[in-house]
């Protein structure tokens, strides 16, 4: 004789399975906080063969500057452990800046911190946000490798700036929270 289950019993079995899976998933992940501090070396002198930040687009007939609305920059800055450019390299800061405010006081940044050091080699942290100089805060919106599913924030402040050479050193502090999967 075949056994039949009522819809109520099937619904209850399904609910037990869903709750059990949710409890297992909650136990399987832990949040891990990572705090990083390092220094970006930016050379933005137009025409300098060593430039790491250059304007690539802007409003026709207007100067392409950091304070001119609509100016787009591409950046590929070295990131080192200390402010000394000869200190160990940790990563590259690769992305875009766009002067995003009509008054020229705010910019939009989207970039990847691409790690090259032994500890995080190949991992990335993705940042994005609108802020203004000299101190900024943007969101960490994701990551890869060791920073998969990362969320958090990054703050930066100018550590050193030479107006003549347009070389700046920017201290970058990144705090992320990512899932650590434990099975």
Image (tube, rainbow, N blue to C red):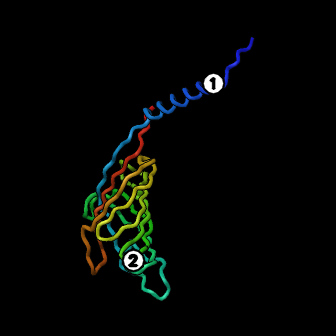
Name the outermost residue toward the bottom.
61
Left-right relation of 144 to 33 = right
Report crowding for label 2: few under 14, some 14 to 19, many 20 or more residues within 10 A (C-alpha): few
Left-right relation of 77 to 59 = left
Q: Quadrant of residue 113?
A: bottom left
Residue drawn 41% across and 46% down? Answer: 146
Disc 1: which residue = 8
Name the outermost residue toward the top.
1
Residue 53 appears in the figure: yes
Q: In this orientation, which residue lies closer to the viewer: 133 or 38?
A: 133
Residue 80 appears in the figure: no
Where is residue 70? Give x, y as percent.
46, 78
Where is residue 35? Give x, y as percent.
31, 50
Disc 2: which residue = 49
SS for tag 1? helix
Residue drawn 61% across and 27% down? Answer: 11
Q: In this orientation, which residue lies closer to the viewer: 183 or 31?
A: 31
């Amino acid at each position: 004789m075949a056994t039949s289950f009522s819809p109520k019993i099937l619904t209850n079995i399904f609910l037990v399975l869903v709750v059990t899976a949710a409890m297992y998933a909650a136990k399987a992940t832990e949040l891990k906080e990572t705090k990083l501090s390092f220094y970006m070396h930016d050379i933005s002198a137009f025409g300098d063969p060593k430039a790491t930040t250059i304007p690539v687009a802007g409003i026709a007939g207007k100067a392409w500057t950091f304070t001119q609305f609509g100016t787009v920059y591409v950046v590929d800055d070295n990131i080192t452990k200390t402010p000394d450019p000869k200190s160990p390299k940790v990563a590259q800061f690769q992305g875009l800046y766009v002067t995003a405010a009509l008054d020229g006081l705010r910019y939009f940044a989207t970039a990847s911190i691409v790690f090259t050091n032994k500890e995080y080699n190949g991992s990335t942290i993705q940042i994005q946000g609108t802020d203004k100089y000299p101190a900024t805060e943007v969101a960490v919106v994701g990551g890869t490798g060791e920073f998969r599913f990362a969320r958090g924030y990054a703050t930066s402040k100018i550590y050193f700036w030479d107006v003549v050479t347009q070389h700046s050193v920017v201290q970058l502090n990144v705090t992320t929270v990512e899932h650590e999967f434990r099975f």
